[in-house]
Amino acid sequence: MPETGNKIAKADIDLIDGSFDISQSENYFLSVQTGRDRLSFCVFNAGLNKYVVLRSYLVSGLNLDSMTTDCRAIFEKDDLLGLRYKNSSHLWISPHFTFVPEHLFDSNEADLYLTFNHEVAANEQTLQNYVRPAGLYSVFSYPETLTALLKLFQPDINLFHHTTPFIENLIRGRIPSSISKLGMAAYFYSGNLDIVLVKNNKLLFYNTFEINAPADSVYYLTIVANQFEIDLSSTKLMYAGSLKDMSPETVILKDYVEVVECEPPDTVTYSHYMQEPMRKNFINLFSLYTVGTVQLLRQADNHRITVEFPNKIHDFTGVFSYSYAFKRSYPLRGNQKLVAYGNANGFIPDIKRYFSHFTPFCWHIVKKSPQ
């Protein structure tokens, strides 16, 4: 294996809660996030509704090959990434993506959609995520070498693009604006800036810009603000990603707009080692568990389902026949069962509410109960 350097010899963020039990990994959920300069992962204990591990490594951002080499070295040496988990998901951070409205989307044309805006290399594959709150598909390129590496250690891992959890967070109300106002957000990563506008809980604008100097962020934000007649001096800009409080980008931005940090999901708890400022740097990673498990529900059909809590089991027969959201969108395939993790004391029998509105309960398909 090629030498990868001392920088990945040890994680620069390594937080493990006292409740974490490595022998119970098959009851935990693994979320991994990779960009050109960093690999991070967290572990979620659904029984406790708590994130119990956060670990992050710097990787080489010179090119895709060097990044993948570093990632392989990390997977081979890390004592947690190779464990068996109940479910695992991976988030790829990349500016190479495009959006397609769901009523126009054809999975057979995914490559064509992407090549309208980006060149897809021979060693890349085209994938898509359905972003239900926005009514669109995020179509993105994904390195085949990274896919092979991930599936070597986690064969059933689910693959996502960073736009999926970010958009879902914004539309579901994690942007600092009232429902009648237009909210503005920025996501900084690896020399890129995503600018997002949300109004009335609907996606109004999303675009990516290359950042080569701190002033670039102000330039692009100003262009977008002018296009939509937004007064930056009276606007709150929610930011997330790799931006630091005292970075040049932040210092310059604060002269033009009120900058506030993106809030991580509050429907779960975090180890006391994961202080709030640190959590905000990993908002998409911490959102991946919820997004990933809800995405699994978007495969639907009229089957009997078992909803299983840590201490109680509730059976529902024929529930799909009168719940339009279920009937249209949530088939179970093969030997699967719908499992919901949460506090059974807070259970609401009206299942339709779980899919009409987001709730603290975390859902995961395991296997179907007998007919």
Image: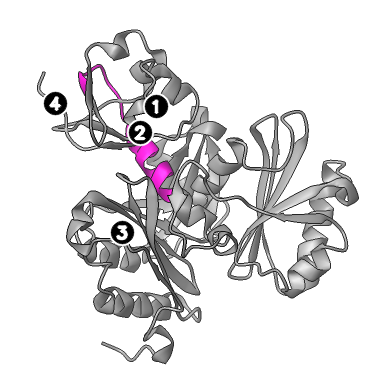
Q: CA distance from mark 4 to mark 2?
A: 22 Å
Q: Nearer the viewer, residue 89 or 137?
A: 89
Location of mark 1 (residue): 346
For residue 44, above or below residue 69: above
Tell me which label, 1 or 3, sits earlier in the chain.
3
Q: Which mark is residue 343?
A: 2
Q: Nearer the viewer, residue 265 or 216?
A: 265
Residue 175, image x, y percentages:
67, 43
Location of mark 3 (residue): 19
- Label 4 close to label 1 by CB (< 8 Å): no
Q: Is residue 229 visible?
A: yes
Q: Amino acid at mark 1?
A: Gly
- Label 3 close to label 4 by CB (< 8 Å): no
Residue under the point 43% across and 58% down = 271
**What's the image's color scheme?**
one colour
In reply to whether residue 294 is colored magenta, the answer given is yes
